[in-house]
Image (spheres, helix red, strand yellow):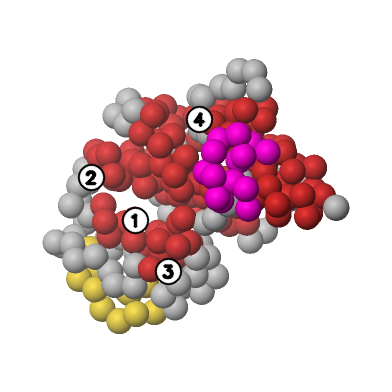
Amino acid sequence: MTDERARAAERRWRESGAIEDEAALLRERLRAGALAASRLRWAAACGHAAARGVIGGQVSEDLTTLQADLDDPDAEARFWLAVIRAGWVALRDDRFLFHLWVFERAFFGLPWPSHTENEYDTLASDLLLPIEELFRAACARMRGVEPTFELPEERLRTPPEALEALAAHVPADAVRAVLLRDWVPWLLGHEDPVARRAVAALEPPGVAGIDWSSIRDPGPAGRRRPRRPR
């Protein structure tokens, strides 16, 4: 049976770690209907060697082209979550650890503390706040509800506009590296690195200008966001 073939292929790959064995596993998952061809294509666009070996030919690495191809709100939300991490790490102001911890905990419905934040604008916040809105919009579509936006309309950006603005300050290779590490293993059905990290990081980071208070349950993923006091 195909499922048995897929399990055998996974064992071979886990034992060897070889690109050829991973490609064989991906082919079996495709045949078994356990992996969508679109997800394989998205992984290949991030530079995943085994996915490229299965697809063959040229694959566009343009992030705007990749994002426009996303027809799955869950995959899109996780795409933006990886872009947010790549952007905050590259542009880092002193709040970046706080933002990453809260966004990933909230996405998986894990408890995170209420807090107050010293509000100020930086290059990082200017570029990433519109991307955070795109992430929340994808989360809303995951839940089947109409997205709402907290930024004023003049600060909202379309996906191409947001990615173009980010690309002026964060190399596309840096974003693809995070996608390859955090997003692609989930796309291909290997593992979920972001969930593992969020579950393991129980304590909030100590960050200057952030005062944590009591832990609260954020409810379903994406329902609440990090509060930015006015």
Marks 4/2: CA distance? 25 Å
Give the amino acid at mark 3.
Answer: Val
Secondary-structure class at tag 1? helix
- Label 1 vs 4, first from the N-terminus: 4
Q: Are marks 3 and 1 in contact (CB under 8 Å)?
A: no
Q: Nearer the viewer, residue 19 or 141?
A: 19
Question: What residue did someone put label 3 on?
Answer: 199
Q: Name the front one of labels 3 and 1.
A: 3
Question: What residue did someone put label 2 on?
Answer: 92
Question: What residue did someone put label 1 on?
Answer: 100
Marks 4/3: CA distance? 27 Å
87 up-or-down from 55: above or below: below
Q: Are marks 4 and 2 in contact (CB under 8 Å)?
A: no
Give the amino acid at mark 2.
Answer: Arg
The spot of residue 6 in percent (x, y) is: 73, 50
- Label 4 vs 2, first from the N-terminus: 4
Q: Tell me if residue 17 is in the magenta stretch.
A: yes
Quadrant of res 27: top right
- Label 4 vs 3, first from the N-terminus: 4
- Label 1 vs 2, first from the N-terminus: 2
The spot of residue 52 in percent (x, y) is: 60, 28
Secondary-structure class at tag 2? loop
Marks 3/1: CA distance? 13 Å
Q: Main secondary structure of the magenta part?
A: helix
Give the amino acid at mark 4.
Answer: Gly
Residue at 20% across / 71% down in the picture? 211
Quadrant (top left/top right/bottom left/bottom right) for the C terminus = bottom left
Q: Residue furthest left?
A: 208
Q: Is residue 125 left or right of residue 195?
A: left
Q: Tell me if residue 82 is in the magenta stretch.
A: no
The spot of residue 130 in percent (x, y) is: 41, 43
